[in-house]
Image (cartoon, grey):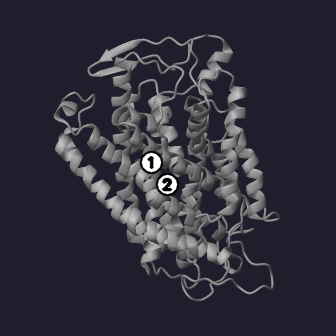
C-alpha cells in the first residue's frame, strides 16, 4: 500500500477532516519518478472515473444481448436505465458512509497510511461487528464469484479465435495468467490499466453494434421475448449484476487523494457505460433475435473476421492477462482481506505479500472449472449476492447510521436538496430495499437458480466446452427455450463481414 514515508497533512474543510496529501506521489524530478507518476500512481477523480467505468462494463457487455432476448427490447432498455440509476444511488450512499467513517477516525488521529479501508471496516466502525460480519460475507463471496466470472469469460472468448482447445483447457491457461495480479499493490496502481481497459471495452461495444447492423437480420428472425417469467427475471438480474459493480467502491475511494470528490463519479461512469451497453445489446438483439437465447456470448453469432478477433483479444486483455484489469479489480479486495486475516497487510515486501496472496486464486480457478456457465452464472450472482452487497446493505446501513437526530445533525455530508434531504433519501432507500428484495432477490433468485440448475442438468458440472457447436455429423443439441432446434452459427448466412 502507501509507503510510510509520505507526508500527511491534516486539513479541516467544513465538516471534513482529510489527509490532503496522503497517497500523492512525490514531486521528484527524475525521469523514473515522472514516468511512474504518469502511468502507475493514480489518485485523481479522473483515475476513479476510469476505474469505475472500466470495472463496471467488462465481460458483462457480451451477455447483455442474451438478456435482451430474455426480456425483449423495451424491458431490456428500461431495466438498463433503471438499474443504472439505482446503482449510482447506492454507490453514492457507500461513498457517504466511507467519508463519514474516515472523518470520524481521522478526528481520533487514526493513521491510514499503511492500511486500505474496506467496506466491512466501514460497517464495523459505524454500526458494529454484526454488520461487519454480514457485509464481509456478502462482499467476499460476490468478489470471489465476480473473479470466477471473469475467468470463465476469458475461456469463452478465446475459444472463438482458437477452437483447437476446449473452453476448460483455456480456463486452466487463463487461471495461471490471472495469478500474476498478486503483484499489483493497490488501486493506486491501476491508472494506465483502467484507461486502456475502457478503450478496449469501448472498441468492443461499438464493434458489436456496427457488426450487428451491417450483418443485418438473420433469415426468419424472431423477437419473442419475453415469453417466460423464468427467462424474464433471469435477464433482469443479469442487468442488476451489470450495474452492481460498485463492490470495490471503498477501495477505489481510498486510492483517491480527495475521496470526497467521488460522490458523483459513479453516476458519470454509468452514463458513459450506457452509451456502450444500450447500442450494442439492442443491435445484436435486432439482428439475431431468439438465437441469442442459446448463445449467451454475443461473439458466437458474429462472423469470424479480423475485427471480431481484435475485439476478442482486447476483451481478453481487459479481463485477465497478466496485470490486466478486471480480474484484478475483483480480486484485489480479496487479497486485502486475506492479508489482514493472516497478518500480512502491513508488510512492506511486495514479493512476500504476492506469495501470501496466491491461495486466493486457487478456489477461483476451481470454481470456474466446475461452473463454466457464462451468462447464467452472472444472473445467479446478481440475484443472490449483488442484490445484498451493493443495493440492500448500503441502503439499510445508511438509514441505521443516521437514524438519530444527533447523527443527522452532525453528519459530515448532508443529503442533497434535490432528493428531499433526509426524508427524501430515506424514502428512496426504503424503495431500493423493498424493490431489490422482492424483484432482485425474490423473483430474480428463483428465476436465475432455476436457469442455473437447468444448465447443470443439461451440460453437467466440469463440462468440457459449454455451448460449443457440436462436432460435424452429430445431432443438433436440444434447445429448450423455443422448442425447436435452431441453426448453429456456422449455418447462418453472413451477408456482411466486418
Q: Nearer the viewer, residue 157 or 186?
A: 186
Q: Is 457 located above or below residue 316 in the figure? A: below
Residue at 61% from the left image edge and 65% from the top image edge: 297
Q: What residue would you read off at disc 1?
A: 272
- Relative to residue 14, is residue 349 drawn left or right? right
Which quadrant does the C terminus fall into? bottom right
- Relative to residue 346, is residue 418 drawn left or right? left
Q: Are marks 2 and 1 in contact (CB under 8 Å)?
A: yes
Q: Is 440 located above or below residue 340 in the figure? A: below
Residue at 68% from the left image edge and 62% from the top image edge: 370
* Total labels drawn: 2
Q: Residue furthest right?
A: 164
Image location (x, y in percent) of residue 399: 26, 43
Q: Is residue 101 visible?
A: yes
Q: What residue would you read off at disc 2?
A: 276
Q: In which quarter of the view is residue 107 placed?
A: top left
Amino acid at each position: 500500500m502507501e509507503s510510510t514515508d509520505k507526508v500527511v497533512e491534516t486539513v479541516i474543510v467544513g465538516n471534513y477532516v482529510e489527509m490532503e496529501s496522503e497517497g500523492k506521489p512525490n514531486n521528484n524530478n527524475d525521469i523514473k519518478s515522472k514516468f511512474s507518476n504518469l502511468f502507475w500512481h493514480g489518485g485523481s477523480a479522473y483515475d476513479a472515473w476510469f476505474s469505475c467505468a472500466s470495472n463496471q462494463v467488462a465481460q458483462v457487455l457480451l451477455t447483455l444481448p442474451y438478456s435482451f432476448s430474455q426480456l425483449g427490447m423495451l424491458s431490456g432498455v428500461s431495466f438498463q436505465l433503471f438499474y443504472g440509476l439505482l446503482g449510482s444511488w447506492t454507490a453514492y450512499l457507500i461513498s457517504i458512509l466511507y467519508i463519514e467513517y474516515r472523518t470520524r477516525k481521522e478526528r481520533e488521529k487514526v493513521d491510514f497510511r499503511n492500511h486500505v479501508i474496506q467496506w466491512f471496516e466501514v460497517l464495523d466502525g459505524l454500526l458494529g461487528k454484526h454488520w461487519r460480519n454480514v457485509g464481509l460475507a456478502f462482499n467476499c463471496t460476490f468478489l470471489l464469484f465476480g473473479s470466477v466470472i471473469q475467468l470463465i469469460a476469458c475461456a469463452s472468448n478465446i475459444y472463438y479465435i482458437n477452437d483447437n482447445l476446449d473452453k476448460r483447457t483455456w480456463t486452466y491457461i487463463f487461471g495461471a495468467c490471472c495469478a500474476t495480479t498478486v503483484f499489483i499493490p493497490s488501486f493506486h496502481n491501476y491508472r494506465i490499466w483502467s484507461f486502456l481497459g475502457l478503450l478496449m471495452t469501448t472498441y468492443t461495444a461499438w464493434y458489436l453494434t456496427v457488426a450487428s447492423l451491417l450483418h443485418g437480420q438473420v433469415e426468419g428472425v424472431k423477437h419473442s421475448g419475453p415469453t417466460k417469467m423464468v427467462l424474464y427475471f433471469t435477464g433482469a438480474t443479469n442487468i442488476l449484476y451489470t450495474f452492481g459493480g460498485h463492490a470495490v467502491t471503498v477501495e477505489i475511494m481510498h486510492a483517491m487523494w480527495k475521496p470526497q470528490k467521488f460522490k458523483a463519479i459513479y453516476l458519470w461512469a454509468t452514463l458513459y457505460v450506457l452509451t456502450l451497453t444500450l447500442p450494442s445489446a439492442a443491435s445484436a438483439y435486432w439482428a439475431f433475435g431468439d438465437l441469442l437465447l442459446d448463445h449467451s456470448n454475443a461473439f458466437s453469432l458474429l462472423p469470424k473476421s479480423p475485427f471480431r478477433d481484435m475485439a476478442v483479444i482486447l476483451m481478453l486483455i481487459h479481463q485477465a492477462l497478466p496485470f490486466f484489469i478486471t480480474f484484478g479489480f475483483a480480486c484485489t479486495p480479496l487479497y486485502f482481506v486475506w492479508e489482514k486475516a493472516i497478518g500480512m497487510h502491513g508488510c512492506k515486501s511486495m514479493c512476500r505479500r504476492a506469495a501470501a496472496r496466491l491461495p486466493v486464486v486457487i478456489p477461483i480457478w476451481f470454481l470456474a472449472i466446475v461452473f463454466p456457465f457464462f451468462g447464467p452464472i452472472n444472473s445467479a450472482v446478481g440475484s443472490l449476492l449483488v442484490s445484498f452487497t451493493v443495493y440492500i446493505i448500503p441502503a439499510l446501513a445508511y438509514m441505521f447510521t443516521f437514524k438519530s437526530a444527533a447523527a443527522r445533525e452532525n453528519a459530515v455530508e448532508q443529503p442533497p436538496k434535490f432528493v428531499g434531504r433526509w426524508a427524501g433519501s430515506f424514502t428512496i432507500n426504503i424503495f431500493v430495499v423493498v424493490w431489490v428484495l422482492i424483484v432482485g432477490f425474490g423473483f430474480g433468485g428463483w428465476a436465475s437458480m432455476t436457469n442455473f440448475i437447468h444448465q447443470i442438468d443439461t451440460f453437467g458440472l466440469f463440462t468440457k466446452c459449454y455451448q460449443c457447436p457440436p462436432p460435424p455429423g452429430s445431432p443438433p443439441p436440444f434447445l429448450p427455450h423455443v422448442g425447436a432446434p435452431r441453426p448453429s452459427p456456422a449455418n447462418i448466412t453472413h451477408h456482411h463481414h466486418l
